Image (cartoon, grey):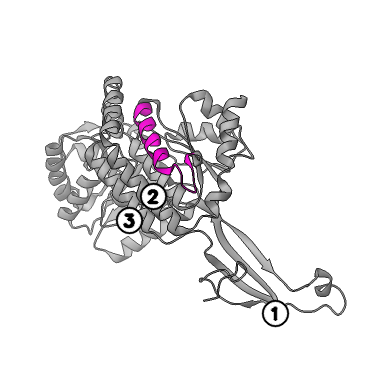
Amino acid sequence: MTSGIYGRFLQVKAMTTALSASSDPDRRALLERIAGGLLADADAIFEANRTDLENAASLPAPVRARLKFSREKLDASIASIREVAALPDPIGRVLYREKLDEGLLLEKISVPIGVIGMVFEARPDALLQIASLCLKSGNCLILKGGSEAINTNRALVESIRRSCAGSFATPGWIELLETHDDVAQMLKAQGVIDLIIPRGSNRFVRYVMENTLIPVLGHADGLCSMYVDAAADTDLAVACALDAKTNYPSACNSIENLLVHRAVAGEFLPKMATAFAAAGVEIRGDEAVQAIIDCKPATDADWDTEYLDLIISIKTVDSTDEAIDFISKHTSHHTDAIITRDPVARAAFMRKVDSASVFANCSTRFADGYRYGLGAEVGISTSKIHARGPVGLEGLMTTKYLLCGSGQVAATYMGSGARAFEHINLGAGGESVNLGGEKS
C-alpha cells in the first residue's frame, strides 16, 4: 500500500473519536450547514454534472439516468439530509440494561462502527445519502463513486468539506477516492477501515468480498418479481406493476419478472399490455402469455436478467406455491410482491418468500430507506448478517457493553459457596446510567 493513500486513510481514522463523541445537536447543526452549502454551490455542482453527462454520451440510457443530477435531485437530496438530521440520535442508545448484582450494572449501548468504506455506482445523489447517514451516526467515510460521476462527486465533496471547515468534524472525516488503484488499496486497509459497503452488480460485490479481509455488507442484484394472484383486483395489479416497472426502471427495486395466475391471465394481460405499450415497455412472455397478447418470446435467461430498462418478462403460473417456487429460484432476495385480495395467499407469500422486503398490494418501488422513514440509505442489503433491506442509521451502528461495579471480583461468583448473580432485567431506553445519565 502506498504511503500517500494510506496516510489519507489514517487521517480519516483519526477523526473517529471526535465524531463518535460529538453531541446530536452539533451533528444536526452541521448537517443543516451542509444542506445550506449545497444550495449555495448548486451552480458549480450542476456545471460539473453537465461535464460528466457530456463525457458519458455513449453510455447506456439507464447509466445516464442515474448519473444526471438535476435540480429535482438536489432538492430531494437536501430534503433527505434535513430529514436525517431530525432523526433521533442513534449514538448511545441503551439497548439492554441488567443488574447483575448489587452495585454491578451492565448496559449494552449503540456506538458507531468507525470508518465506513463505500464503493457505489455513478449516482451522485447516493453520495449525499451516504454522507448524511454517516455523519448523523458518527461514522467517518471513505468513498469511491463511479468514474462517470467523477466531476460531480468532486463538487459535492468539496461543498461538504467547505461546510465542515471549523466544525468539530473538520473536513477530514470524509475522503473521496477517484481511481481503481485507490479501491484496491482500500480493500487492503484492514485495521483502519471497519466496514466496506459496495453498491453495484453482484459480480462486483463478489469481487470485493473475495479481495478483502475487512467485513463487507453486500448489496446484490435487484432482481425483483411481482405476482398477480387469482384473487387479484386486476386494475390495482396493473397500476402497481406499471409503477414498479416504469417509475424508475434503472432502480434496483423495479420489477424484472411479472408472474400471473392463469385464472386471471385472460383479464389481466390485455390491460397490462395496453398500459405497458403506452409507457414504452417491451414485453417478453412465455407461451401462455404469447397466446393472449402480442409479445416477444421469453428465454430461460430472461428470468434471471436484471434489465434496469423498460423491459419486462411475464410468466403464467397455476398457484401461489408455484409463484413462490419460481421466485425462490430466480430472485436476488431484494424485494418481491404479491397482488391479491385473498388473505390466505397473502400470508403464505409474505411468510415463505425469503427476501429482504416482501410486499402485498403495492409497488416494489417502496423498498427504499427514505420511504421507510430511515431518512436515507447507504444501500439495500440482501445479507442476513448485521443488516438486511434498506440500510439506514441502525445498519451503521454496532454495540458495546458497559459494566460498572463497586469492587466486585469474578472469584466471588465461582466455586464452592459462590455468590449467585441476581440477573434482574431493568429494561432498555433512557440515558446510560454507566455514562452518567439517569435511568428512565
Q: Name the residue nearer the viewer: 362 or 293.
A: 362
Numbered mark located on residue 422 in the image: 1
The residue that disc 3 covers is 359
Q: Amino acid at mark 1?
A: Glu
Q: Going from the N terminus, do you reach mark 1 or mark 3 first? A: 3
Report, in whole angstroms, how far the alpha carbon at label 1 lies from the one at label 2: 44 Å
Direction from residue 34 to residue 435 in the image, left or right: right
Q: Name the residue nearer the viewer: 338 or 85.
A: 85
Q: Going from the N terminus, do you reach mark 3 or mark 2 first? A: 2
* Residue mark closest to the camera, 1 vs 3: 1
Within-10-Å neighbours for mark 1: few <14, some 14–19, many 20+: few
Q: Name the residue nearer the viewer: 264 or 113.
A: 113
Find the magenta span and give its range: 149-171
The residue that disc 2 covers is 31
Residue 157 is one of the magenta-drawn residues: yes
Please, is residue 2 above or below residue 278 in the view? above
Direction from residue 55 to residue 219 in the image, left or right: right
Tell me residue 401's x, y (percent).
64, 62
Q: Amino acid at mark 3?
A: Phe
Tell me residue 197's x, y (percent).
49, 41
